[in-house]
Image (cartoon, coloured by chain):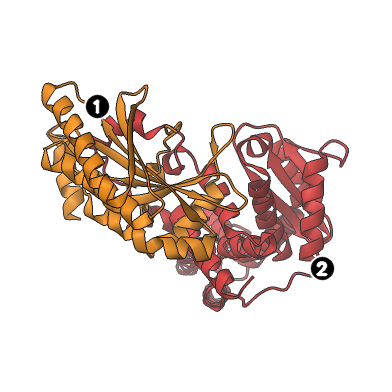
Chain colours: A red, B orange
Amino acid sequence: MRQKWYGGDLGLQVRMFITMFLLAAVYLAFIAALFYAGADSFTVMIFAAVLLGVQYFFSDKLVLAASGAREVSPAQAPELHAMIDRLVQQADLPKPKVAVINSRVPNAFATGRSPSAAAVAVTTGLLETLDRREVEAVLAHELTHIKNRDMAVITIASFFATVAQFIMRIGFWGGFGMGNRRRNGGSIAVAYLASLLVWVISFFLIRALSRYREFAADRGAALLTGSPASLSSALVKISGTMQRIPDRDLREVEGLNAFFIIPAGVGRSIVELFSTHPSLEKRLAYLERLQREMERAGL
Amino acid sequence: MLKSLRDFFTALFGSGTGPVGSRSEPIFAITTAILTLETSFELTPTGRAWLAFRGIESGGFQEMRREIHDLLVIGARQTATKVETATDKYGYVWVVLTDPDFEDLVTTMHLASSTLEEHGFGKALLAAVFEFKHPERERVYLIYNFKRGKFYPFVPRSGHTRDNAFELRLKGVMQEELPFEQELERWYPLWDIPA
């Protein structure tokens, strides 16, 4: 059964496109500045391209190895495989590699340069902390990342930012070397400043893009499972003790209610600028909205 | 903004001693909310509700407790609400109300809590619990926290766990109809509600 992607979130998609457009604009300006400054930066770009190419092609193996994930067969993890089987069928995706990480911290990720060369990994902590429906929701979220090719998008988006970073580092150490004596200090400075600017701006833009794609993955998961609330409760459980729905009886903690702790409200919005993921509140609010939409659409 | 400033100074000067006051009025919102509970979630009231308050060891409190019981029994006669009391291992007193008419149940609940408040024991009030049944699920509870003046859901499952997904679904819809607790970390459960 092919899952129909219900009325896409236009607002979200618009924001994503604007972010990517701005990134592209910044990068084009960057290239112009580089060419103005001199052609040696070209070498840097080639170098970075090769590096990113390697990263891109070996991404799944690298990430899996680094995280200590072991691939598991259907015999070793029948329930996990069964859940993924159902989900990929609905999402119309080829089945990715399935891996498990031995860690008490609940976590999950998806990696791979394309849907046909992808992997999904979950920690043992996640499988223990969440119930079946919540695990399914998290898997659906990761599979949506694969379907949206988010790894490729972010890698490409990071390309020029990486180049800028390299140039900054080289420029800082005072060398473009290569014996090009005719170039004066002015154009080196231009290249360096351009790189700095590009790196700073793209830093925030890439993070914004990453956050929008997280929302998109949440949406995909909600539609795939038909249950935004399952993903919500999974997120709440994973997010840590501060924002969890408590287990301790009200009568035990009643006396503590008298103590008020200043909520970390102010700091949060600044922290979010630097974050690759939207805050838990925003994700929960988004999923709540989705729930209402789905009920109205009679899903 | 003003509240967090007040809270800050309360914390700073350590004047946050003792329990916080209580709010009874918002509890009536649930009488109209049951319509949505039925249509959106297939939940119907079981006709049972509980009022929990901290037992205080003082003559005045024991006297008031008796007075409440008598008052409720009398007042309940008009609404035909059944009234029982019980204590639990934490030292809390539970008033168990039974009434097939939900509005009467809420009225009696409010009568009980406001009586405590009038006698100056508002600070002892902990929570009001309303019970609902679902055709397929186990029991669903809506807990009203007097100190926060807000409702939040509690859906216990066997093995001392909660159905968080259903609780969040309830929040999504019911927050439009009831004063609802937005901070998830304040959704404290009440295990072992007396039968």
Residue A154: image location, x then y, percent: 63, 62
Instruction: Tell if the residue under mark 2 belongs to the same chain as the one under mark 1.
Output: no
Instruction: Determine which quarter of the picture holds residue B84.
Output: top left
User: Where is residue B71 shown, x and y percent of the image?
Assistant: 19, 40
Q: Is residue A95 found left or right of A43 in the rendered image?
A: right
For marks 2 and 1, give the CA distance.
59 Å
Dot 1: chain letter: B
User: Mark 1 = which residue?
Assistant: B55
The location of residue A80, given as percent across then percent down, is: 77, 44
Q: Residues within 10 Å of mark 1 (few under 14, many from 20)?
A: some
Query: Is any part of residue B163 visible from this angle?
Result: yes
**Where B49 sits versus B13, above or below?**
below
Name the secondary structure under disc 2.
loop
Q: Residue B186, relative to residue A294: is it above or below? A: above
Left/right placement of residue A66 relative to residue A229 reads right
Q: Secondary structure at mark 1?
A: loop
Q: Residues within 10 Å of mark 2 (few under 14, many from 20)?
A: few
Measuring 60% from the left and 62% from the top, which residue is drawn there?
A158
Question: Residue at the location (52% across, 77% down)?
Answer: A11
In the rendered view, does A138 fall on the left or right side of B2? right
Front of the two marks 2 and 1 = 1
Q: In the picture, which quadrant includes the C terminus of chain A?
A: bottom right
Can residue A180 be seen in the rendering of this structure?
no
Q: Identify which residue, B46 or B129, lies in the foreground.
A: B46
Amino acid type at mark 2 = Met
Q: Amino acid at mark 1?
A: Gly
List x then y, in percent, for residue A137. Answer: 65, 53
Q: Name the residue rendered at 61%, 76% in the picture.
A: A8
Residue beneath disc 2? A1
